[in-house]
Image (tube, rainbow, N blue to C red):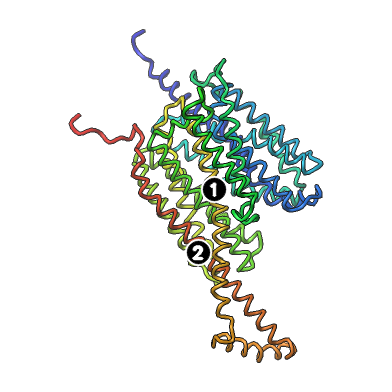
Amino acid sequence: MNGEKDPGRIGNAVGAARDGKWIVAVTVMLPTLIEIIDTSVANVSLDHIRGSLSSGIDEAAWVLTSYLVSNAIIIPMTGWLARTFGRKRYLTFSVLLFTAASFLCGSSTSLGMLVFFRVLQGIGGGALQPISQAILLETFPPQEHGMAMAIFGVGAMFGPIAGPLMGGYITDTLSWRWIFYVNIPFGLLAVFMISMFIKDPPYMKRQFGEKVDRWGIALLAVWVGCLQIMLDKGQREDWFHSTFILVLFAVVVLALLLFVIVELFLAENPVVDLRAFRNISFTSGNAVMFIAFFNLLGSIVLLPLYAQLLLGYTATLAGLVLSPGGVATLLTMPLVGRFIGRHNPKYPLALGVLVCAFSTWDMSNFSLGADFNALLWPRIYLGFGMGLLFIPLTTLTLSSIPKPQMGNATGIYNLLRNLGGSIGVSFATTMFARRAQVHQSYLVEHMTPLDSAFRSAVAKGQALLPSRGIPDAVAGNATLARLYREVVRQATMMGFNDAFYILSVLMACVLPMLLLLRRPAHQAPPVVGH
């Protein structure tokens, strides 16, 4: 009958749609994964790169910084660029640029060439995360947004785990150039899959004649670029005691203020639509994600430092302390994605915040006698907490955003997530260094002949050292040197404890903000009486 629907045809259509969304998910996650890996793959190869290109350690660090700066500038512009050029066209161009720049990075013959091509690679890679996130949220129905973000989250968390391991293995077995060459086949495969399986919705087709927001682009590049450089160089330059850092800070504040004014009041087609912050769930979610990555990256940069500086761990052993936490995150995310499809995402989100705060507090109780398990379990708790937190927070933050604004929203969200991590690293290392100095100054006050415990320790050392082959004439100075080294170790330990404790308090302080997050419309509780 013409008026009847064929159940078989309907079933085939539903099956095709179901299969199609998974093909789209694989397509957009492939370039995203290689881009995320590339943010950390060069870390362990810097010494090889420095030696090969005859550069200093500070100069070689620009191989990392140049990529992060250009990446951070592009991320918030992604929504505007996708609207202006068409999302599929812009995504294809970004993957091609990333792939070509990877080849040029591997072929570089000087540090200047490598840094320049890393900038190009960052420009190409910056769009991949927000565009992939936007496509996943549009492709999966609202009730499956949790699972879509679980897919994205697995990629986002797998990259930092796999990057250093891949970089180290490839550098040791082949050469540092192959950490870039390996991107080429995956990039070409991604371009092919994008051409086959990605389609632009009507509102993401190329828009002709749209006025370019030149001032917005320029101001965005200035304040984000200067902020990243300031964060990278701050601790080394002694922060605001340095004229260089003061100038950068002034430029950041002025450029950011002008950027907000231009984007809100003057730009006809703003490169970053800040009106998205009128959505209370979006604003609150961005703030929580900023602090979550502030806590995550701040703590996992301190943990291997503590293991190596105070416990004598090798780089490999320190890496083994970190890796199980990433595995815990990967195992937790798919389960949480399924859970929030039927239940309130705020429940696992609140639990995730508490677990993250607890894990960092647990790290603040480390001692000089901690064994491997004492380091391992807090990192696993942190990984478990991030697995509980990432999916529901992303879903609550972005699910209420209209589809035409999704690219702009994911760009802002990813920028603030990255900035949270960058600022967290700078804050944690600075707090550790400053608090260690404070504790050392307090402990040194007791290294005086007027202190009975100090006199007793010196006397024991002077009596003991000659029996170990140290002449009486130098036993006194040797004892003082040993006591001072122990003071430095104790002060350093207390510096780590203080930094971890501050991170845990900041993480716990975001709990009240969860009340401002709204459940997705498809999960809203039914109205009584209807």
| Spatial separation of the CA atoms under disc 1 and disc 2 | 19 Å
Q: Is residue 170 in view?
A: yes
Q: Secondary structure at mark 1?
A: helix
Instruction: Find disc 2 in the rendering and name its residue.
Output: 498
Along the line of sight, the residue nearer the viewer: 512 or 344: 512
Question: At 42% across and 44% down in the image, what residue appears?
Answer: 336
**Residue 144 visible in the shown view:** no
The C terminus: image quadrant: top left
Quarter of the N terminus within the rendering: top left
**Residue 479 vertical placement versus 158 (above, below):** below
Q: Earlier in the sequence, mark 1 or mark 2?
A: 1
Numbered tag placed on residue 421 in the rendering: 1
Secondary element type, mark 2? helix
Number of numbered callouts drawn = 2
Q: Position of residue 218 (x, y in %)?
A: 60, 31
> 10 Å neighbourhood of mark 2: few (<14), some, or many (≥20)?
many
Three-letter amino acid code of the residue under disc 2: Asp
Q: Locate residue 240, reporting x and y percent.
A: 59, 53
- Residue 491 locus on image (x, y percent): 56, 70
Relative vertical location of residue 446 with respect to residue 129 in this rendering, above or below: below
Residue 161, above or below 121:
below
Tell me what residue is drawn at x 74 percent, y 49 percent.
59
Q: Return the residue found at the far left.
A: 529
Q: Quadrant of residue 129?
A: top right
* Left or right of residue 106: residue 257: left
Q: Residue type at mark 1: give it.
A: Gly
Residue 32, quarter of picture: top right
**404 or 283: nearer the viewer:** 283
Residue 198, horizontal then vertical, whole percent = 56, 24
